[in-house]
Amino acid sequence: MSDILPNAFQQRLLTWFDVHERDLPWRAESVTPWQILISEIMLQQTPVARVIPKWLEWVQRWPVPSAMAESGVGEVVRAWGKLGYPRRAMRLHECATALATRFDDVVPSDVETLLTLPGIGDYTARAVACFAFDQSVPVVDINVRRVIARAVHGRGDAGNPARTDLADAQALLPDDPARAPRFSAALMELGALVCTAKNPRCGDCPVPDCLWVELGKPAVTTVKKVQKFAGTDRQVRGLLLDEFRGSAGPVGRDRIDAIWTTDIGQRERALDSLLADGLLETLPDGRFCLAGESTRQLGT
């Protein structure tokens, strides 16, 4: 275990953050908890640069949960565009509906209640409680886990999530609850900008007594599999969804069959998975439409 001193860690990291904090739109003082929740859902497995324009568009279009709830789920999936993992859009629509009907458009402030919302897992609940309501709760993403793995445990990478992750983050939080949310944001920022997975900029790191550095930066032994995209079911699913997002009406079999001719079985498997996930619906005449649009499309 590192001899890292929490007080020194906190002060140097916060001083660094005062200078290097990115000007991200969801960090503005005027941003609401609902808009922060949207940003946290969008940022899962998606780079910040891709999220910013989509987030700006969404918070203008759906400034409160009820506005999104009143839109069809298909419209939300269509607006999701190419952010990836479109089931997040469906779950966000479900969450908006729950907030509108159960909470009068008010996002709950406590982790336990946030966890009762559709699509809200432990990370998102803690992130919203921390960043939207200034609560002193540990927030652990891959960037935080990587910083702690190196600075505290002397490991080169974060490894797999563990039950001890929250306790490790909690141990580093300032005793002053008022400073904790900003410290959590700074810890994430350090992992995103300096203590990166590849080519970490240790010379720019403000953290004192990093155990990984003290140990001579032991090589990372975990072998990560690079997931290809071209030719995968995920690519075919994306191509099929693109057809529906760009269509003003139902999509027939002829158009679907023309989308992917390389492997017919793969195309059918992708179509079946979209139907099983609830992203698409089947019309009585055999055509298909985005989720929630079957009633509107029956007369098309």
Image (spheres, grey):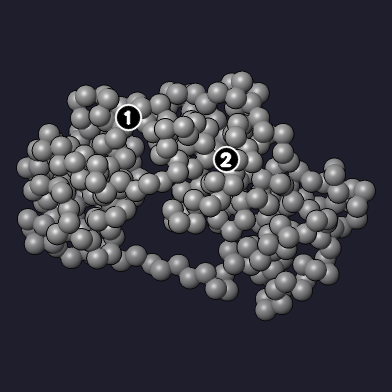
x then y, percent, for residue 210: 12, 50
Q: Is residue 267 above or below residue 58?
A: below
Q: Which residue, given by chain and number where applicable, does mark 2 sit on?
A: 59
- Few, some or many C-alpha atoms within 10 Å of disc 2 (few <14, some 14-19, many ≥20)? many
- Do the numbered discs 2 and 1 sit on residues whose CB atoms are within 8 Å? no
Residue occupying the far right of the picture:
299
- Few, some or many C-alpha atoms within 10 Å of disc 1 (few <14, some 14-19, many ≥20)? many
Which residue is painted at 52% across and 26% down in the image? 107
Q: Toward the viewer: 125 or 100?
A: 100
Q: Quote the CA–CA distance across marks 2 and 1.
A: 26 Å
Q: Is residue 185 above or below residue 160?
A: above
Identified by mark 1, the residue type is Val
Lateral position of residue 247 relative to residue 206, left or right: right
* Quadrant that contains the N terminus: top left
- The circle on residue 191 is none
Which residue is painted at 8% across and 62% down in the image? 216
Q: Toward the viewer: 286 or 17?
A: 17
x then y, percent, for residue 300: 91, 52
Q: Toward the viewer: 60 or 117?
A: 60
Q: Is residue 126 visible?
A: no
Lateral position of residue 196 relative to residue 109, left or right: left
Q: Which residue, given by chain and number where applicable, does mark 1 sit on?
A: 137
Which residue is painted at 64% across and 62% down in the image? 237
Q: Toward the viewer: 241 or 178?
A: 178
x then y, percent, for residue 268: 71, 66
Identified by mark 2, the residue type is Val
Q: Is residue 179 above or below residue 274?
A: above
x then y, percent, for residue 262: 67, 79
Which residue is painted at 60% across and 31% down in the image? 64
Disc 1 is placed on an element classified as: loop
Q: Earlier along the polypeptide chain: callout 2 or callout 1?
A: 2
Q: Is residue 58 visible?
A: yes
